[in-house]
Image (cartoon, rainbow, N blue to C red):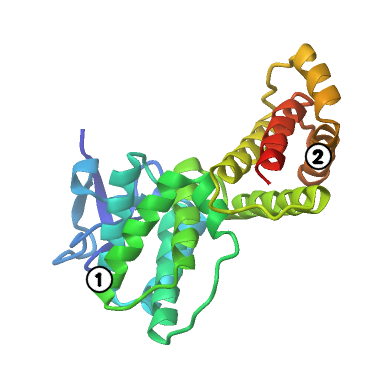
Amino acid sequence: MKQILTIEKVLNNNVVIAHHDTFKEVVLIGKGIGFDRKKGDDISFDKADKTFLLKDEKEKEQYVNLLPHIEENLITFIQELLLYIEEQMDKDLNEHIHVALTDHLAFAISRAKKDMQFSNPFLYEIEALYPKEYQVAKGVVKKVEERMELVFPEGEIGFIALHIHSAVTDKSLRDINRYNLLITKLVGIIEDNLSIQLEKDDVDYHRLIQHLHRAIDRAHKGNPIEKESKLEELLKKEYPVCYNLAWKLIKVMQNQLNKPVDEAEVLYLTIHLQRLINKS
């Protein structure tokens, strides 16, 4: 069944403000959605129109304030990119990505035109944690570079991947960055305690990063994992250095997250750490 809305204001060819029975005032974003329309016109909203709906008061206000600073053809292009992301991820995107990614890409394009370079210290971690988002972000960067005839620094892939992850998981970028900083801190503690330099493109490094991420996620959601008492005794005896370091990492996680971390995580961390030692 089609939802019929009434246009309150046409902001440009691709963005209109309309009245919605449930959400009151909403922002509709879609290619050509505002073309040849005026206040009081009826407009239908359904998925077939490939139209995005901004209903959150704060997101709506930020997006409307952002529009005058961005060329209209760029807004159309970003709309295409968001549809590409949604298709590739095969998930609905949280509406906050419209503000966040529009703002980020407009600024990134402006930076690239001025040849301002920067690095992303979390690039390897982001690729290890969110491989699908990373590949989709690569596709986004390629499309931007071809359309805008410019070159993005590699670090942009990581930043865009974070925006995509945030939009498909409903996590805020603040939380995601907080977890990434914690993982970087834990990796630093591991390197210091074991006196090793971890190879960031190594498969065991990727496994460790993903395990730390899942452990943080489980702590955040309060999901315990099954405890193996016999395995614990064995690991404690065979690998005391890694076992004690695993406990240290758990304590750091608990302090940073301000949440209890399941003790059974120690076992799996010990195995990951021992694997790294064996390699080095």
Q: Amino acid at mark 1?
A: Glu
Residue furthest to the top in view is 230
Asked whether, in this view, residue 96 is left or right of residue 258, the answer is left
Q: Is disc 1 surrounded by few (<14), some (14 to 19) or many (20+) residues within 10 Å? A: few
Picture disc at residue 254: 2
The residue drawn where x is 78% and y is 12% is 230
Q: Do we see residue 94 in this rendering?
A: no
Q: Which comes sooner in the sequence, label 1 or label 2?
A: 1
Q: Amino acid at mark 2?
A: Gln
Q: Quadrant of the N terminus?
A: top left
* Relative height, residue 265 to residue 40 (above, below): above
Give the percent coordinates (x, y) of residue 223: 67, 25
The residue drawn where x is 66% and y is 31% is 218
* Relative height, residue 234 to residue 218 (above, below): above
Give the percent coordinates (x, y) of residue 243: 82, 32
Q: Which residue is mark 1?
A: 146
Q: Is disc 2 surrounded by few (<14), some (14 to 19) or many (20+) residues within 10 Å? A: some
Give the percent coordinates (x, y) of residue 47: 24, 42
Asked whether, in this view, residue 143 is left or right of residue 246, the answer is left
